[in-house]
Amino acid sequence: MLNFDDVPKVALDFMNSDHEEATNITNALMALLDTAEAGTADTQAISDTLQSLHNHCVEHFSRENAQMEHFGFPAYPVHHGEHERVLAEMQGEMDAWRDAGDVVRLKNYTFQTVPEWFIGHIQTMDTVTAMFIQQCGGPFELA
Ligand SMILES: [Fe+2]
Ligand SMILES: [Fe+2]
């Protein structure tokens, strides 16, 4: 499980809120996968939670992208590109889960790939982005 106390905090509250929501959904998915014995996995609940994580990431990333674009963040293409890469990777895992229902594969993605990426991404791109936007007087009001 991810402990939100251990998730690095950035300079902007809206980003920390998104990171808390991402933490909560990832933890919900981990809890479902933890109790998924071979053949008795609640596949619908797992699929629904994985879809929730993807939906959250689309919105979370688009909020960051909008702020970066608005304030002309110089590394916008790199940060935006990383968001796109992660969404494509997540879609690939969703497709694989739908087609094969491989709990071991999805556990590996959820317990290894996602947390490692999440913490590393916040420590680097999100941290620098939040400082830049704050120094520009942002964030601008999101709809
Ligand atoms: Fe973020
Ligand atoms: Fe980001």
Image: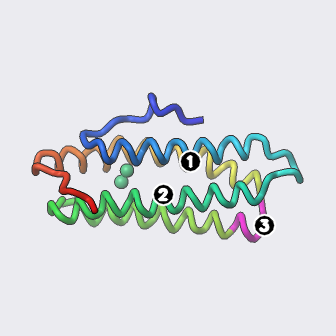
Q: Position of residue 42 (x, y in %)?
A: 79, 53
The amino acid sitting under disc 2 is His
Circles 1 and 3 in contact, beta carbons < 8 Å: no
Mark positioned earlier in the residue sequence (3 or 2): 2
Picture layout, residue 143 above or below residue 139: below
Circle 1 residue: 25
Assess disc 1: are there few (<14), some (14-19) or many (≥20) residues with their C-alpha within 10 Å of its C-alpha: some
Quadrant the C terminus occupies: bottom left
100 or 56, which lies in front?
56
Left or right of residue 106, residue 76 in this image: left
The amino acid sitting under disc 3 is Ala
Circle 3 residue: 100
Is label 2 within 8 A of ligand 1 (CB to nearest ligand atom)? no
Picture layout, residue 14 above or below residue 91: above
- What residue is drawn where x is 35% and y is 63%? 62
Q: Which residues are magenta?
A: 96-101
Of all residues, the one furthest to the left in this rendering is 136
Left or right of residue 71, residue 124 in this image: right
Q: Position of residue 136 (x, y in %)?
A: 10, 51
Of all residues, the one furthest to the front in this rendering is 143
- What residue is drawn where x is 15% and y is 60%? 71
- Name the image colouring: rainbow
